[in-house]
Amino acid sequence: MSHLKLGLFALSVCFVACTTENPLYVPETIAGDGGVRDLATASHTDMPSGAKDFATPSTMCTDGERLCSATASEICEAGMLAVDRTCPTSSDCKGGYCQPPPVGQNNVGKSCSTSAGHETEQLCLIGVSGNQNNAPSCQPFVSNSSSDKSISWFCAPRVGPGLAGMPCTNGDVCRSGFCGDNGTCFRACVSVADCPSDGGPGKWKCEQVDITVEGLPASASSCIPGN
């Protein structure tokens, strides 16, 4: 037999052997999942029933869903979790909302709402010793009740270094943790007397601004730069 014929004969034997069913093959059986699964059979899948196939994209969360991380509250947007608010130090997160910190030193955990129901940073500064930049800030917190999503105000450790009136685009850079819709760091006030004393008359105004507190719109008076 010529070398050419011998080569063609060997190739034909290999082709037949490689394409013919193996009589010794035993299909895999998965207990409790419909019995035999042969990946070559279109009617079967390559994963147990109910399992997630990595080839199929899955949504991590439902839009609008609120969750907590170790240091922040989170909101689901387009199927992905995003940080909504950085919780101040000593503040826990429950049910997707940062909680008021427990009562501690230097007014931490104290209400910063007046008897008339107005919030002011001044109540967080009274009696604080040392550098007042390290004093707590008057911050809003959403009730964790499923039926009542009201906002209350408490003195809490500062979030960022930004003082009243400093330009901002997000709350993380501000002491209060909030940036007003006027583009400056929010500082709660009842009147100009509650604003920093630097700069003399006309330096500050106490005017209403809008903020968003973990999905809830709110309006409050803030110290903003004067004319």
Image (cartoon, rainbow, N blue to C red):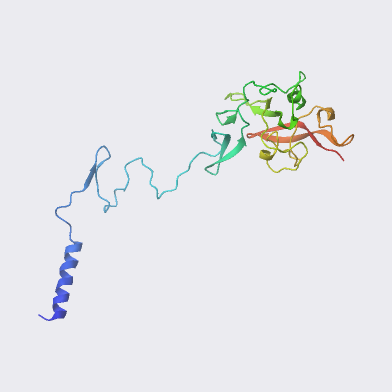
Above or below — where is 54 with respect to 18? above
Give the farthest residue toward the left. 1
Q: In which quarter of the image is residue 9?
A: bottom left
Above or below — where is 40 with respect to 187? below
Q: Is residue 69 left or right of residue 178?
A: left
Please tell me which residue is depicted at 62% across the width and 22% down the height of the picture. Answer: 102
Q: Nearer the viewer, residue 203 or 40?
A: 203
Residue 159 position, x and y percent, is 66, 34
Give the farthest residue toward the front. 130
Q: Quadrant of residue 191?
A: top right
Q: In which quarter of the image is the N terminus?
A: bottom left
Give the farthest residue toward the right. 201
Please tell me which residue is depicted at 40% across the width and 48% down the height of the picture. Answer: 54
Residue 99 position, x and y percent, is 60, 27
Q: Quadrant of the C terminus?
A: top right
Asked whether the viewer can see residue 86, the reply is yes
Please tell me which residue is depicted at 68% across the width and 29% down the height of the picture. Answer: 140
Residue 36 position, x and y percent, is 23, 45
Residue 165 position, x and y percent, is 78, 38
Asked whether the viewer can see residue 118, the reply is no
Please tell me which residue is depicted at 75% across the width and 37% down the height of the picture. Answer: 163
